Image (tube, helix red, strand yellow):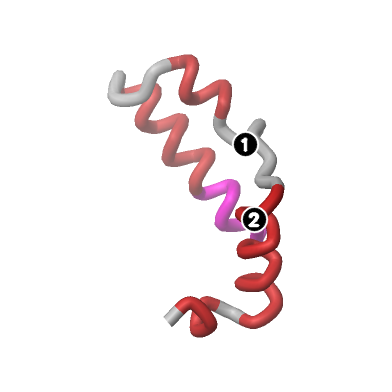
Amino acid sequence: MNKKILDMVQGTAQDFYNAGVMHDTTLREQGQKKPNGPSLKLLNLVAKKGLKILA
């Protein structure tokens, strides 16, 4: 994932937490999960060929 996009998503998650909309547990899990199996294959395919392959 593009570093800039990831930074924006993490910043938004932090803002949600600060506003009381997101729980601490959710915030800690942010970025810790790693895709595997079919989801990893799909993400790699989209990264290589773009979103147009899903249409």
Left or right of 1, for residue 18: left
Residue range of the region highlighted in magenta in the rendering: 1-8
Q: Are marks 1 and 2 in contact (CB under 8 Å)?
A: no
Q: Position of residue 3 (x, y in %)?
A: 67, 55
* Label 2: few (<14), some (14–19) or many (≥20) C-alpha neighbours in 10 Å: few
Quadrant (top left, top right, bottom left, bottom right) of the C terminus:
bottom left
- Which residue lies under the disc numbered 2? 38
- Which residue lies under the disc numbered 1? 31
Corner quadrant of residue 44: bottom right
Circle 1: residue type: Gly
Q: Is residue 12 above or below residue 3?
A: above
Disc 2 secondary structure class: helix
Disc 1 secondary structure class: loop
Rounded to the nearest angstrom, the CA distance separating label 1 from label 2 is 19 Å
Circle 2: residue type: Pro
Q: Position of residue 17 (x, y in %)?
A: 39, 24
